[in-house]
Image (spheres, coloured by chain):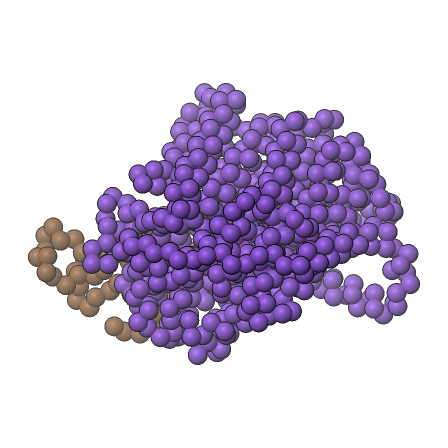
Chain colours: A purple, B brown
């Protein structure tokens, strides 16, 4: 298909055009152009998705440099339904976010729109590329744009520090990836992922391969924000403008997981197949730690954007577990979950943007009861909380039931309870905010507590608080939340994703269709929602509601608990909070420890 | 192929990380970051090095001569472009940080403590 490269090329060229002529372009035209390009790219990616979804994954060789005798010299875009779907999804979120920012920013001089378009092109390239080095380059392009977008309000302390932490953490991650790529190139002489995979099939999982894998994994897991390389995420999300957070949480972080999965299944699945059990344990430990750490920190926040950021970390933990199960069903579960989570989180960040736009605060206590003025926002916010708790029968619920069934298949019967805890904590925290802000439930904060916790500087998105919310800023999140509800029930969507995941993890067949262009695809969707899934789903939602109620009205109850227990809990929480020091040196120390831990565990256990 | 270039690459990577962790000045942090990245250059170049090989420009040498691997050199070039972008952006942010925080010491950047 000749349109294959356009989802990458068109937004990059449009961005250059906007930057060139922005001085003479009225705001309306800049927004119109950017949004138009967004719609165009969504259409292009959807065409690719439709083409591949009928069983035709294909490789597009840039400049016609096709492989000869199954040796790839050129650079390919390797299009399969999972990659094309992710490209479509990211383009969709960028477009939604561009529409939302029509009214979110009082002034936008074209730079913002151009950066958003570059970001879109980079994400499309990241999802579609079949070349390992290009994957790393798109990672960096995505990163550089994201750092600049984080510091959009570069006159304020928070965004500056957040962008610095984000940029340094992710750059070091990228260098680890480069080292891994260099090692693989030294071993195989190839950069195309399928080609590397084919070459490694004849090798054992020796230390060089394992070190390369660990470095590449830890690099992409930094983007995905898995514990203990997640610290940058909360900082960046707390300070970036809401339309940008939409993309960070909704899809950028998930792209990190996608890269790890794609690289594992295309490159390492051959030599690592005999050691899958050990690798599974390592990844699931990491995922579980991430899910719980993120969940607890999420519930402990009062800064709403930071709360949503930690909720994303918790969900990343589930994604890492889902991938870590190393099965087709696990990949399918993550794919479904990413769509549901992306829509929901995007909607929630946009609603938080509404709060900021209207009241100039995102502090839960500061906003106590003030949200009554915007009841519709409150309804949407509460719906978002219920969706996050993976209530039956929304998209997230189908993802979670697949995840549970994948965990049981792989022999981890305790894993679903981790997922339930994570759903409860993240959903409960959002519902608690909804109750406190939009209904005024729970006690207000005492004056001295407020003084002690003087709301830290807040982003000035606008000149003055406004007394009404523009329609676009409510319609877009409403549509996204509807998306989060309905995608899972579209007939054929979930089974289709399962089939696509079956192809995604079929190492030999991926190599065949990329290098030889031969496609044979005998996969079928097998799973269906069981009775206990509804029980788990309903349980998580009820749990989230109870946690929210506990957070709002639990103070008398807390007084009855033994002092020692309360002391221990608050000390533990204090320690956990102190680790998020905002100091880049600390973060990189954690990063180094995480890399050493993952590499060490892989070298010791995978034998 | 000698062991030395790999040791240098590893050392640059680790010493750069140490620089970022221990830095008390953002400019030093950013320079340390480029040191980390230099480790990747050295590794890439040593991977492609051929003993006695010439530069892989076949316009003025016979096409059968021993030559170093040009692919890794192109990768390093890309890597350098990325470094220029990120370093430039980070230095601009450091200037802003100095304006708004009145300091370049990461310990004094306190907008984001949890």
Can residue A408 be seen by looking at this rendering?
A: yes
In the picture, measured across the screen, residue A402 lies left or right of residue A458, that is left
Q: Assign the N terminus of chain B to one quadrant of the image.
A: bottom left
Q: Residue at x 36, y 48 (%)?
A: A56
Depth check: A101 or A479 in front? A479
Residue placed most toward the observer, A453 or A523: A523
* In this view, A25 is above or below A46: above
Q: Quadrant of the C terminus of chain B?
A: bottom right
Answer yes or no: is residue A254 visible: no
Number of numbered discs: 0
Name the residue located 91 percent from the left edge and 56 percent from the top edge.
Answer: A556
Depth check, front residue: A577 or A598:
A598
Residue under the image location 63 percent in, 31 percent down: A475
Instruction: Name the residue furthest left.
Output: B62
Q: Position of residue B46 (x, y in %)?
A: 29, 65
- Up-down relation of residue A192 to residue A324 (above or below): above
In the rendering, at what x and y percent does residue B27 appear? Answer: 50, 52
Residue placed most toward the observer, A124 or A144: A124
Give above or below for A419 relative to A211.
above
Left or right, residue A115 beside residue A519: right
- Tell me the quarter of the picture where residue A9 sits: top left
> Which residue is depicted at the point 58% across and 47% down?
A488
Residue A563 is situated, as x and y percent measured from the top left of the image, at: 88, 67
Tell me where residue A425 appears, x and y as whole percent.
71, 56
């Amino acid at each position: 298909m000749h349109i294959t490269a356009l989802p990458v090329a068109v937004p990059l060229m449009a961005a250059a055009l906007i930057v060139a002529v922005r001085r003479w372009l009225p705001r309306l035209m800049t927004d119109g152009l950017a949004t138009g390009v967004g719609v165009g790219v969504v259409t292009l990616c959807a065409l690719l998705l439709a083409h591949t979804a009928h069983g035709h994954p294909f490789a597009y060789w840039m400049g016609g440099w096709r492989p000869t005798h199954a040796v790839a010299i050129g650079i390919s875009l390797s299009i399969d339904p999972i990659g094309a779907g992710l490209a479509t999804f990211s383009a969709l979120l960028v477009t939604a976010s561009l529409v939302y920012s029509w009214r979110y920013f009082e002034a936008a001089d074209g730079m913002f729109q151009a950066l958003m378009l570059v970001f879109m092109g980079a994400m499309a390239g990241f999802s579609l590329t079949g070349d390992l080095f290009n994957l790393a380059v798109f990672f960096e392009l995505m990163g550089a744009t994201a750092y600049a977008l984080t510091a959009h309000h570069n006159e304020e302390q928070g965004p500056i520090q957040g962008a610095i932490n984000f940029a340094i953490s992710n750059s070091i991650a990228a260098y680890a990836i480069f080292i891994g790529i260099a090692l693989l190139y030294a071993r195989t002489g190839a950069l195309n992922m399928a080609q590397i995979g084919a070459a490694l099939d004849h090798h054992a999982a020796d230390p060089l391969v394992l070190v390369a894998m660990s470095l590449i994994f830890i690099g992409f897991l930094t983007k995905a924000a898995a514990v203990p390389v997640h610290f940058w995420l909360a900082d960046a999300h707390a300070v970036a403008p809401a339309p940008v957070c939409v993309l960070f949480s909704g899809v950028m972080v998930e792209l990190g997981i996608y890269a790890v999965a794609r690289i594992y299944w295309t490159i390492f699945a051959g030599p690592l197949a005999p050691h899958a059990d050990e690798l599974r344990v390592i990844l699931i430990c990491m995922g579980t730690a991430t899910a719980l750490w993120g969940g607890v920190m999420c519930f402990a926040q009062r800064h709403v954007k930071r709360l949503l950021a930690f909720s994303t970390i918790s969900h990343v933990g589930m994604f890492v577990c889902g991938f870590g199960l190393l099965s087709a069903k696990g990949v399918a579960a993550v794919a479904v979950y990413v769509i549901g989570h992306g829509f929901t989180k995007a909607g929630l960040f946009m609603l938080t943007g509404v709060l900021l736009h209207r009241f100039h605060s995102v502090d839960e206590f500061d906003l106590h009861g003030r949200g009554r003025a915007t009841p519709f926002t409150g309804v949407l916010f509460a719906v978002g909380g219920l969706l996050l708790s993976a209530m039956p029968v929304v998209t997230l619920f189908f993802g979670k039931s697949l995840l549970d069934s994948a965990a049981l298949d792989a022999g981890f019967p305790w894993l679903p309870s981790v997922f339930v805890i994570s759903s409860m904590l993240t959903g409960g925290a959002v519902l608690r905010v909804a109750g406190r802000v939009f209904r005024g439930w729970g006690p207000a904060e005492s004056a001295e507590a407020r003084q002690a916790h003087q709301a830290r500087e807040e982003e000035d998105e606008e000149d003055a608080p406004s007394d009404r919310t523009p329609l676009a800023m409510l319609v877009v999140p409403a549509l996204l939340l509807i998306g989060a509800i309905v995608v899972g029930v579209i007939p054929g969507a979930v089974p289709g994703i399962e089939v696509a995941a079956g192809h995604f993890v079929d190492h030999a067949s991926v190599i065949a269709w990329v290098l030889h262009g031969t496609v044979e695809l005998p996969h079928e969707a097998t799973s269906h929602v069981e009775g206990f899934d509804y029980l788990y789903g309903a349980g998580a939602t009820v749990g989230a509601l109870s946690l929210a109620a506990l957070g709002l009205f639990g103070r008398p109850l807390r007084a009855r608990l033994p002092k020692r227990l309360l002391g221990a809990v608050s000390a533990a929480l204090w320690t956990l909070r102190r680790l998020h020091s905002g100091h880049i040196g600390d973060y990189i120390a954690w990063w180094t420890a995480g890399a050493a831990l993952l590499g060490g565990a892989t070298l010791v256990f995978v034998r | 192929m000698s062991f030395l270039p790999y040791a240098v690459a590893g050392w640059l990577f680790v010493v750069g990380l140490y620089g970022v962790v221990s830095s008390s000045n953002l400019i030093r942090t950013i320079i340390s970051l480029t040191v980390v990245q230099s480790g990747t250059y050295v590794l890439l170049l040593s991977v492609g090095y051929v003993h006695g090989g010439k530069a892989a420009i076949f316009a003025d040498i016979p096409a059968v001569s021993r030559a170093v691997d040009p692919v890794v050199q192109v990768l390093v070039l890309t890597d350098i472009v990325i470094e220029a972008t990120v370093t430039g952006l980070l230095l601009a942010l450091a200037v802003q940080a100095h304006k708004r925080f009145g300091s370049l010491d990461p310990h004094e950047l306190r907008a984001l403590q949890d």
